[in-house]
Image (cartoon, rainbow, N blue to C red):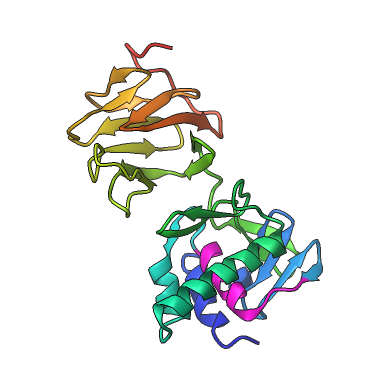
Amino acid sequence: MNSHVPAVYNDVEMGQPSPDSRIVRFGLFELDLVTGELRKKGVKVSLQEQPFQVLAMLVAAPGELVTREALRQRLWPDTVFVDFEHGLNKAVAKIRTALGDLAQSPRFVETLERRGYRFIAPVEAVDLAGRDTVGAVTRPPLVRLAWGDRSIPLGEGTHVLGRDPAAEVWIDASVVSRRHAAIEVSSLTVTIDDLGSHNGTFLNGARVESPTPLADGDEIRVGPACLTVHTAAPLDLTKSAGADD
């Protein structure tokens, strides 16, 4: 058994009082955070210790950015930068091979360039007694933003768009403010608001002056970035008044 795994398991267990949440499920896979095993439809999939630990950290925070620095501090605290970069890149490549995932069109592990990684598939805790799902660790994203070949999932909460590398939607351009705009997602509505940016936020060609509802197919422009809104669940949304198709 991997001596580091229980520490990662404790992260996943936060907010999940049942000890049976030691096993999590995503797609056809199950990850045992105590024994350090990955299985696909009950069949064990080979995954070495370091890649397993990286995967465990990612599924502990589904839908959230796990930074390269956080991974380094947890898993490579005493290595030099070059060794860490090589080790992490190799570990992520092995995870993708084990899951049959592609960096260009990910179903599980999304790369956020120069910042880290995000686990984008829904993750569920498994009841060991009945082998049934006992509760979702995270809800599937309510909204996705399509930006070129990227698909950015947004769950409930506030999501900042901007030049700050810590922003959920990072747009690395000088004409974009560090905290440029914010999308607020709830179970019923999705809105966007400009955060006092210098060059403005535009929805379907109209400048956003106040919190404005978003609907499926809406187009958001922030600096050079053009993002299309796709709702992943039926929401009670209406297009913004004055926003042209």
In the figure, residue 101 lies in which quadrant? bottom right
What main secondary structure does the magenta stretch of the protein show?
helix
Residue 215 included in the magenta stretch of the image: no
Residue 37 image position (x, y, % from top left)? 70, 75
Residue 88 image position (x, y, % from top left)? 52, 71
Residue 19 image position (x, y, % from top left)? 59, 74
User: Can you name the residue that lies furthest to the front here?
Assistant: 82
Comparing 66 with 115, the one in front is 115
Quadrant assignment for the N terminus: bottom right
How many labels were placed on the picture? 0
Comparing 208 with 172, the one in front is 172
Which residue does the image show at 50% across and 80% down from the upper left? 7
Which residue does the image show at 41% across and 87% down from the upper left? 78
Q: Relative to 91, is 104 above or below?
A: above
Residue 47 included in the magenta stretch of the image: yes
Start and end of the magenta stretch? Answer: 45-60
Q: Is residue 232 left or right of residue 66?
A: right
Quadrant assignment for the C terminus: top left
Which residue does the image show at 53% across and 75% down from the upper left? 87
Q: Is residue 136 left or right of residue 216?
A: right
Q: Is residue 131 left or right of residue 21?
A: right
In the figure, residue 212 lies in which quadrant? top left
Q: Relative to 79, is 191 above or below?
A: above
